[in-house]
Amino acid sequence: MELIDGKKISAEVKQEIAAEVEEIIKNGGKKPHLAAIIVGHDGASETYVAAKVKACHQVGFDSSEFRFEDTITEAELLAEIEKVNQDDSIDGLIVQLPLPKHISESKVIETIRPEKDVDGFHPMNVGKMVATLPTYLPATPAGIVELLKRYKIETSGKNCVVLGRSNIVGTPMSVLMSRKASHGDCTVTLCHSRTKNIPEITREADIIIVALGMPEFLTGDMVKTGAVVIDVGIHRIKSDKTKSGWKLIGDVNFDEVAPKCSFITPVPGGVGPMTIVSLLQNTLIASKKEIYS
């Protein structure tokens, strides 16, 4: 069993991005600029945006944050997004999810200009992904593909099971793994809360990507020997074995599943660091106007 080290790979990719940014600036180009809009004071969102800002500085990007109280109306938020759309100094914009219940996530996503949608959520960019056209790929699925690539894990012709069908991870992940591309070409089964006999399906899988949001859902008896397991979940639970009184676990029961795997991602330190790196890669592409000129 080999651990897939997302921290190590993300550090390598950041070094590559930083070197490219340095070259761009040396040749008279502008720094890539990523902006984040955050509404309210959700703890996980605050942590994630802070990590994005830190990562921007590490690779030489400019970054901006626009913070609003959760009392902001939908119309007011859409107007703020439009301001960023019109600002030519900003290459990429993310609006941190989740949003307050009175604001439509789909309206927000559709208001962001496709050329600044470095999360890869706009319908135009999703459509380009499905059509295998150059676009910004959703950050977490793109990060997972990067891990498979850098660990030289064979995917062509393999059976891949994706657990979870969210628009952010599960559904785009199933598309990327089935595409005719390097580190695609899988036969993909997408499972969700209504799927029957999930253990029977996962036991046939060469690659299992778990993004259900259910702590330790995947257990040892659901995995065949030699499988590759990618754990997207992250949950903070009470623990009497840590100084903080808390520990992080994923959607996979690591102690049961890991001994049966050829490769597995840990939680934390697996998929998480790659999500931010993918966002940086998309912002760099946006600044170079590679997709939308």
Image (cartoon, helix red, strand yellow):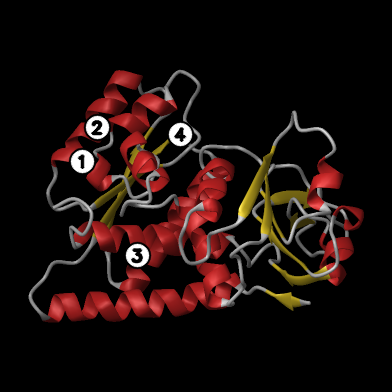
Q: Is residue 22 left or right of residue 39?
A: left
**Label 3, on which residue?**
56
Residue 5 image point, x, y percent: 62, 74
Residue 80, numbered label: 2
Q: Report the amino acid beneath label 1.
A: Val
Q: Residues within 10 Å of mark 4 (few under 14, many from 20)?
A: some
Among numbered discs 1 and 3, the one appearing first in the sequence:
3
Among numbered discs 1 and 4, the one appearing first in the sequence:
4
- Please, what secondary structure does the residue beneath circle 1 have? helix
Among numbered discs 4 and 2, the one appearing first in the sequence:
4
Is mark 3 in CB contact (under 8 Å) with mark 4?
A: no
Among numbered discs 2 and 3, the one appearing first in the sequence:
3
Q: Is residue 62 visible?
A: no
Number of labels in the image equals 4
**Label 1, on which residue?**
84
Mark 3 vs mark 4, CA separation in Å: 22 Å
Q: Which sits in the foreground, 35 or 256? A: 256
Mark 2 vs mark 1, CA separation in Å: 7 Å
Q: Residues within 10 Å of mark 3 (few under 14, many from 20)?
A: many
Mark 2 vs mark 3, CA separation in Å: 22 Å
Q: Quadrant of the N terminus?
A: bottom right
Residue 40, numbered label: 4
